[in-house]
Amino acid sequence: MKTFYATTPIYYVNDLPHIGHIYTTVVTDVVTRFRRLAGEETRFLTGTDEHGQNIEKAAATQGITPLQLADRVVERYRELYRTFEIRNDDFIRTTEARHRRGVEALVARIAAAGDFYTAKHEGWYCSSCEAFYTEKELDADKRYPVHGRPTVWESEENVFFRLSKYAAPLLEHYERHPEFVRPESRLAEVVSFVKGGLNDLSVSRSKVQWGIPFPGHPGHVVYVWLDALANYITALGFGSEDDANYRRFWDHAEAERVHFIGKDILRFHTVFWPAFLLSAGLPLPTTVWAHGWWLRDAKKVSKSVGNVVRPDQLVADFGADALRYFLMREMAFGQDASFSDEAFLARYNADLANDLGNTVSRVAALCRQSFGGTPNAVSLDGEVQAAFVEAAAEWRAAMRECQFHRALEAVWKLLTAVNGHVVSREPWKIRKEEGVGSANLHGVLYAAAEGVRLAAVMLSPFVPVTSRKIFETFALPAADPSPADLSWGRLPVSTPMPEAPALFPRADAAAYFKEKDAAMNEPANPAAAPAAPAAPVDDRISIDDFQKIRLRTAKIVAAERVPKSNKLMRVEVDLGDERRQIVAGIASQYEPEALIGRNVVIVANLKPAKLMGVESNGMVLAASVGEAGAPVLLDVPAEVPPGSKVK
Ligand code: MSP
């Protein structure tokens, strides 16, 4: 039994979703909807990548646990997926027990194949940079000169994976299965990388605590990419008793297994991942499809560049379908594309409001005005039908090749044919001359309406809400179409049609830019933004909101590092009228001794929380400086006594 399994990357939870993440998810949704429409059995997986140092850091900076951070971001993903009508069958989180079990099973198989060995990693370790340095890079006191903090000699035994052993088998696989990496240009890139030689890969970490314990290596966690890549099979039940989905969607000859990714993570998916699977003796994915980047101002849209486009405002103003359409139409899959509000508005008005919206409302109005409903007989006029047959073939071929913009162009050709048909046959004239009972009139309008219905079927993977509205307009159930709906002549005859509002009201671009331009840019630190509901683009708060936060000055009277944490410091502070303990994410920048006696600002009315098992009653405020967001305490002048209100 042929099955189709499609996945997105699992997204890091130290960032909130932006259009880059939405894009890959919508691509995967469009493809699985298309496959369902072709009658295939499909499964669609997405999820979140929740382990690793960066997540640990991001959480510590916010004074919450990594899991709390992940919970917030997951909620945001789920909410956006509802808004975008993403029909994923499963959502995997790498912190789930089922995932851990699967990773353990995968690690066990790789170990049994003899592909792990331990080797020493030694050097001068700087806990601030979380990196090893050579003696030459340090000053006479073994300090790293960039920030002058002492390093310590550390020697770490790491587990290594024999990646080098798989260079030849991988090259052979690429040769025999050129469809393994698509588009083709990416395959060449991967082949030349592997031909350059592969080094063994360190796959355990002892400097990171937030991860899956490495079986048989206490104190080590599984390298975050080995952990993350495994999600594609752990979510199917690999390594658990109930692995029916694994057997159905991964492990049989007719299972098509497809990963959609951005080109940034190509190597992980086309070199590391297949090498792990070869070692474990498991089937490889059929195809890894890598798309290009969304750019803004010629740079990759990303949190670190700081040019992120969040979907919220566009969705609020134009609906999720408009954004789904834009993403699929504007980018040629595989190449980079630029995101701009101007391009979005231009496509919205030209393609959606005008071409699609006007065609639908024009044909619907002609039917309603003439018959109060659909025509009374299937058209014998073959003009639109021929256009449909041609468009459907183009659409299908383009969809199979992930050329979504071409697939949409094919649908637009059909819409043009419908319009041309209406203009050349002039049904209003026929009505005037022959009356509403005219078979000619019914035939012309049936062809037009059926053309519109079929355009809506072909559009349904892209703009599901709009397609349902079109079906409703033409007296059909507002449901996802079935494979049989993709053939000529299924529009019901002589059926009353409801009044329907315009699909895409025209946008006044000039007014839009005036009002919304500033608001479209994201808040400064997305990872710190509130969890739910949708991060408001206008993030100003009222004075009442601000007054809920009690800020006070406090003097640090004791400080010590939280054991096993690089970031957390336990401090005791004096507020004049009370002493309390706070866990602060400042240990990377400050030595405990240097903190004693410092006056700082704290949030005094934060609910208590436990960070790495230590209770924290409040939060010490620090500025976040530089790309890495290093915490720098805000000094309070000496004349301000501890406990003073800050407002
Ligand atoms: N967690 C890893 C993936 C592990 S998969 C086993 C990761 N996460 S991520 O949150 O950084 O997401 C990266 C993916 O998001 C990219 O591969 C791409 O699918 C999508 N995009 C993020 N920014 C993007 C653009 N600017 N443009 C297009 N897609 C991009 O990497």
Image: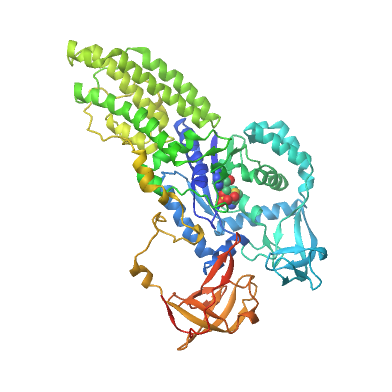
Q: Is residue 379 visible?
A: no
In the drawing, does residue 319 fall left or right of residue 403? left
Q: Position of residue 609 (x, y in %)?
A: 49, 74
Indicate the colouring scheme. rainbow
Position above or below: 161 against 425: below
Q: Quadrant of residue 496?
A: top left
The number of numbered badges drawn on the structure is 0
In the drawing, does residue 158 fall left or right of residue 181? right
**Which quadrant would the N terminus be assigned to in this image?**
top right
- Residue at 20%, 15% in the rendered image: 431
Q: Position of residue 83 (x, y in %)?
A: 39, 47
Position above or below: 112 against 393: below
**Which quadrant would the C terminus be assigned to in this image?**
bottom left
Q: Position of residue 384 (x, y in %)?
A: 37, 17
Q: Position of residue 625 (x, y in %)?
A: 58, 64
Position above or below: 240 against 549: above
- Residue at 42%, 44% in the rendered image: 84
Q: Is residue 103 visible?
A: yes
In the drawing, does residue 41 fall left or right of residue 426? right
Nearest the eye: 154 or 638: 638
Position above or below: 529 against 646: above
Nearest the eye: 383 or 412: 412
